[in-house]
Amino acid sequence: MTLTKRLSFLLCYILPILVVLAEEVGGVSYLIVPVTVFVILPLLDFIWGKDLSNPEETNFLKLQNDSYFRYLTQSWAYVQLAFVVWSVYRIAVYPHTAVEFFLFAISVGIVTGGIGITVGHELGHKNTRYEQFLAKVIYMTVCYMHFYIEHNRGHHTNVSTPNDPASSKKNQSFYRFYPQTVIGAYQSAWELESKRLKKLGLVSFHYRNEMIWYFVITVLFLTSMIGFGSLYSLNVIRWDILGFLLLQSLIAFSLLELTNYIEHYGLNRKELGPGKFEKVLPIHSWNQNYFVSNAFLFHLQRHSDHHANAGRRYQVLRHFEEAPQLPFGYELMILVALIPPLWFQMMNPILESWELKNRLKH
């Protein structure tokens, strides 16, 4: 891997710096964050172009075990926790207009969701308790801890089937998909935990139910943040801090669900028998390989390889030509997904063309 590509994974650290600078300036300066993500990054994608290179298999183990890449994701968990605490401090100590409050929360949510949940997703798939713990810390800051259970044990098993709430169907708008995935994923996480406990001879409402602990931990986190902020207000309870944290969490997990919507839109695994589906293959996820946005998102857009080989770390994920390809990076596709007629006009012909090509091939 070239030095340029190694260093490119540091790009994400620009976002929290931009938020800090915007908070110092105030006003509408917070818009620099969404502008950077949804305007500047796509422009850089077009200027820099695509990265279709794959790591050499002879170098796989060395690259997979390279501690540099591991430290980048692990350190983000600490950055995110400190970043959220800092944002609470700023809300507690410095006056904000209603517009500034709203834009500040959106900017924080773009960081904690667009980058944070992406990193949490990467860490949550790893087989070390430390990295799994860090993933849960990240999810705690956005009030979405159940994602750890549902994504790893639910989504990766049921992806691109009718059983997966996080897989969008052809002609399903994002606004129809959103309640399906938000509510359905939470219900799925409860069901997965209930099944796990039942195998152990335990009832669902047991102290070993992780979903109960996730709820308690999230409430304690929110309460501690309100308490922390209230220390700077002569012990007046600062309910605005709760509103701020919930708003940034809403932005964060909504970005996650927009990404989920994009990643598997209209793709289906063949049903081999009642309730039994073919193995998850690269063709069951949308792929994209723009260099800049892929580096910014720790190769999340090489989603096809991730689903086919979930144990691979982000730096060794591969590009698959046979996988369906998105026309643009996630940043632009998220904006398109928010306008259903435009989404269907853009994506349905690509989906149908790929389906026809795939049928002819097999």
Image: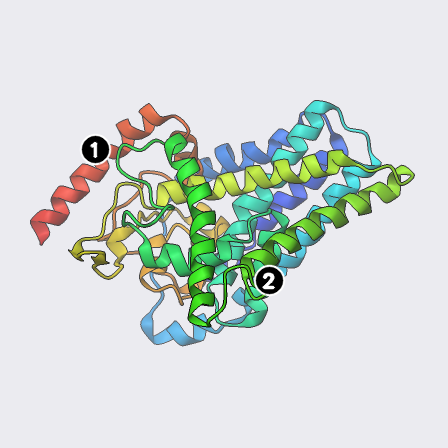
Q: Nearer the viewer, residue 167 or 318?
A: 167
Give residue 275's quadrant in the image.
bottom left
Residue 30 in the image: x percent, y percent? 65, 31
| Quarter of the figure that contains the C terminus | bottom left
| Quarter of the figure that contains the N terminus | bottom left
Residue 100 in the image: x percent, y percent? 70, 27
Task: Answer with left or right where residue 281 lies relative to residue 44.
Answer: left
**Residue at x 52%, y 37% (from the top left corner):** 37
Q: How many marks?
A: 2
Q: Which mark is residue 349?
A: 1
Q: Secondary structure at mark 2?
A: helix
- Of pointers 1 and 2, the one earlier in the residue sequence: 2
Is the residue marked by circle 2 packed among few (<14), some (14-19), or many (20+) residues within 10 Å? many
Residue 260 in the image: x percent, y percent? 40, 44
Task: Answer with left or right where residue 153 lies relative to residue 71.
Answer: left
Q: Which mark is residue 55?
A: none
Residue 45 in the image: x percent, y percent? 42, 41
Q: Amino acid at mark 2?
A: Leu
Give residue 93's quadrant in the image.
top right
Is the residue marked by circle 1 packed among few (<14), some (14-19), or many (20+) residues within 10 Å? few
Whether pointer 1 and pointer 2 mark residues with C-beta atoms closer than 8 Å, the reply is no
Task: Answer with left or right where residue 176 lies relative to residue 6.
Answer: left
Residue indicated by mark 2: 134
Q: Nearer the viewer, residue 106 or 218?
A: 218
Instruction: State whether residue 53 appears in this view.
Output: no
